[in-house]
Amino acid sequence: MTDLHETVLAEATVSALVSNREGLYVDATFGRGGHSRRLLQVLGSSAQLLVIDRDQRAIAVAEALALRDRRVVVRQGSFSELGQWLTLSGWMGQVSGVLMDLGVSSPQLDAAERGFSFQADGPLDMRMDQDQAVSAQTVLAEMDEKSLAELFVTYGEERYARRIARALVEARKKEPLLRTLQVANLIARAHPSWERHKHPATRCFQALRLYVNRELEELQQVLPMAQNALCSGGRLAVISFHSLEDRIVKQFFRQGVAPVQDRHAMWNPQAQALRPVFSYVIKRMEPSAEEVQRNPRSRSAHLRVVERLAVG
Ligand SMILES: C[S@@+](CC[C@H](N)C(=O)[O-])C[C@H]1O[C@@H](n2cnc3c(N)ncnc32)[C@H](O)[C@@H]1O
């Protein structure tokens, strides 16, 4: 196992993001810094780059980078705190580019002790931020059967959610659920319809991970903050890895490019016509076949980039 993360769509993302080489930039998902390092190569000497991650190990790498490059500023925490940090530093409305490469990094996924993987045995953890109280273990120990089934449907789009939730609740009456493989095997046994090339626990593990880390809620909160952070001509680039997060990004960008009034406003003569706030730079891009071959984890990635239109 290595501590490396193979950066997805690195060139395309950085060249679409940078419109001003001396501007202020934010990498809201530092990971192992693949995008950040590429950005720093392109940016000029008076540019600044705020890097964020809520994972302690990612932050250790970011701090080492900041020691070598004085353009880098590091913040540990959730990217939903972006608005607060930018307001405090006077960057709000001044930022030339915000990047988000969503989800987990390879070092998080590959380290069995982090508990993200159904293929390697480890504790049921799944917390990106190790100081957070709620882990996958607490969810599986405490959530009632109905809520667990709802979680598997909402965050995993799992068809057999009720059956799986019942099996897990029955199993925990006999012994506590503590290990990833223990739960993966219980799910596999309860799952009546295995898809080809997909472990039967894939959807439920995704659901647990999204729930434990509040990933979709975080994304919904940060997008308007990122919009407000940008100066005119500033750009927002998001790489998503599954349909639930991509849908949120797509709808947010679409509403910014071609805003639609809600139904009630249409009948209200006082309602102001909505003005677009974004134009598309990249409506949707996927990695090339060559990149997918080199880095199979990139196969489900989608890059979307928008530009902020004149502010005010
Ligand atoms: C896919 S990795 C980023 C990889 C990075 N672009 C690179 O090339 O090395 C996603 C990172 O974002 C972090 N992350 C995910 N959601 C976050 C959130 N809401 N707030 C802060 N960090 C988050 C994860 O801890 C992880 O390190």
Image (cartoon, rainbow, N blue to C red):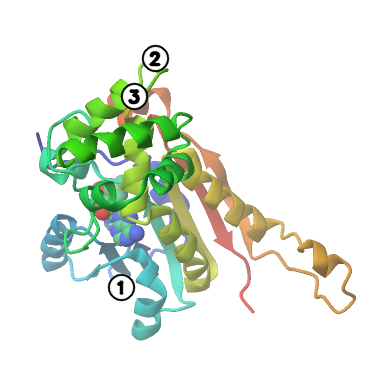
* Number of residue marks: 3
Secondary element at tag 3: helix
Is 200 displayed left or right of 246 in the figure? Answer: left
Asked if disc 2 and disc 1 are in contact, CB closer than 8 Å, the reply is: no
> Looking at the picture, how far across and down is residue 296, in whole percent?
31, 27
- Which residue is identified by label 2? 196
- Which residue is identified by label 3? 190
Frontmost residue, 244 versus 71: 244
Graded by Cα atoms within 10 Å as few (under 14), some (14 to 19) or many (20 or more), the crowding at tag 2 reads few
Q: CA distance from mark 3 to mark 1?
A: 57 Å
- Which residue is identified by label 1? 46
Graded by Cα atoms within 10 Å as few (under 14), some (14 to 19) or many (20 or more), the crowding at tag 1 reads few
Is 273 displayed left or right of 17 in the figure? Answer: right
> Looking at the picture, how far across and down is residue 216, in whole percent?
44, 54
Secondary element at tag 2: loop
Q: CA distance from mark 2 to mark 1?
A: 51 Å
Q: Quadrant of the C terminus?
A: bottom right
